[in-house]
Image: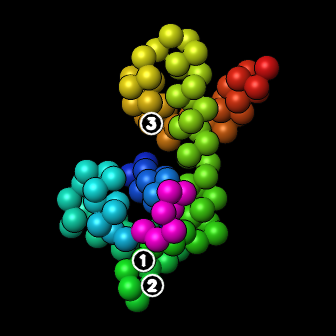
Amino acid sequence: MVLQESGEMYLESIYTLLKNNSKVRSIDVVEYMSFSKPSVSRAIGLLKNGGYVLVDSDGYISLTECGLEIAEKIYERHHILTNVLISLGVPEDIAAADACKIEHVISDESFEAIKKLQDN
């Protein structure tokens, strides 16, 4: 299953929530992303069927190895791109919003170049 931008956003959101809480349910994703319950339920179902998340009998969501790998990649891209834009003088809220768009379409090669630039 090829993951679309929205799927990446869900994985990143679940990852972020799991960093702050040991247990995450769909309702937490609803509140975090400000999406409707049916939208989140459908997305979680698709991610589950795609092998990106697991949902236990109590409704707690965890990331599979594949889901975790993608979530960490998107999370890293978001933070590095946000920081680079802020360092260029972009206001933090605009930098975060723009990074959220860029993180899904930037090539691995371009991102690695930006990451190296920031490390210097």
Which of the 4 quarters of the picture holds residue 64? bottom right
Tag 1–tag 2 contact (CB < 8 Å): yes
Pointer 1: residues within 10 angstroms few (<14), some, or many (20+)?
few
Amino acid on which disc 1 is placed: Tyr
Under circle 1, the secondary element is: loop
Among numbered discs 3 and 2, the one appearing first in the sequence: 2
Residue at point 60%, 62% (across, down) = 68
Dot label at residue 60? 1
Among numbered discs 1 and 3, the one appearing first in the sequence: 1
Q: Is residue 37 magenta?
A: no
Which of the 4 quarters of the picture holds residue 43? bottom left
In the image, residue 53 lies at what x, y percent?
49, 72
Residue 68 horizontal side relative to residue 57, left or right: right
Q: Which residues are magenta?
A: 18-24
Residue 8 horizontal side relative to residue 117, left or right: left
Residue 83 horizontal side relative to residue 59, left or right: right
Vertical placement of residue 99 versus 74, above or below: above
Q: Is residue 41 visible?
A: yes
In the image, residue 41 lies at what x, y percent?
29, 70
Residue at point 20%, 59% (across, down) = 36
Vertical placement of residue 70 versus 82, above or below: below
| Residue at image mark 2 | 56
| Residue at image mark 3 | 100
Residue at point 71%, 23% (across, down) = 118
Under circle 3, the secondary element is: helix
Q: Nearer the viewer, mark 3 or mark 2?
A: 2
Amino acid on which disc 2 is placed: Asp
Give me the C-alpha separation between circle 1 and circle 3: 26 Å
Vertical placement of residue 42 versus 104, above or below: below
Q: Nearer the viewer, residue 114 or 120?
A: 120
Residue at point 28%, 56% (across, down) = 31
Pointer 2: residues within 10 angstroms few (<14), some, or many (20+)?
few
